[in-house]
Image (tube, grey):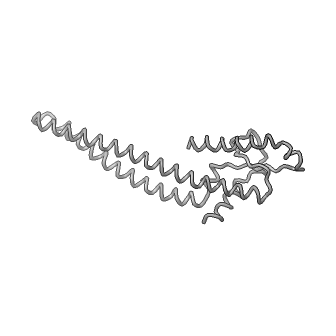
Amino acid sequence: MNKLNLLLKIVVLVFCLAWIPAGGAFAAEEDPRIGFVDIKKAVADTNEFKRVKGGFDLRFQKEQKAIADREAQVKKLFDELNKQGFVLSPELKKQKEARFIQEKKSLERYVQDKNEEFSQMEREITAKITQRMLDVLKHLGKQRKYTLIIEKSATFYFDNAQDITAAAVSAYNKSYK
């Protein structure tokens, strides 16, 4: 999400800098229209994001349960090793220790792989919907004759009447059912 925030701020900065050389464009127009959007909220409030996130959360919960089950198995091996450690032959104890270490490492790798997999999925989903939202914002800007649309987080103050976040979500939901 931090990379996405940085990307969005860069996009906003580029749009702002693009208007500096065109300063005359503002002067030529009677009343420049500037809209403001909370891109994170706009993306999160779309029906598509909610639907995809619901499926994502369900898969994540199932995976958490599978991980918890594997953790319980590793803990059971550890407990058995601690309880039986004094009565086992050195060879058998060594075998059980090796199995415990192997299972623990396997679990750690599995958890790391799943974390990376889910992070990648989340980034891809968010990037896809964000790109579509940017397209919707361009269309909305042209349709409503906005001179500029700026990310809310890049401003210190703006009139809430110029917030087009809800309109962007509505337009997105109509475009991408």
The residue located at (25%, 38%) in the rendering is 101
Q: Quadrant of residue 45?
A: bottom right
Q: Position of residue 118 (x, y in %)?
A: 45, 49
Side of 145 where 124 appears, left or right = left
Q: Quadrant of the N terminus?
A: top right
Side of 113 where 135 appears, left or right = right
Q: Position of residue 97 (x, y in %)?
A: 20, 37
Q: Quadrant of the C terminus?
A: bottom right
The residue located at (27%, 47%) in the rendering is 73
Q: Is residue 148 above or below residue 46?
A: above
Residue positioned most to the left: 89
The residue located at (70%, 42%) in the rendering is 14
Q: Position of residue 58 (x, y in %)?
A: 45, 57
Q: Quadrant of residue 11?
A: top right
Residue positioned most to the front: 21
Which residue occupies the foreground of this view, 82 or 24?
24
The residue located at (34%, 43%) in the rendering is 109
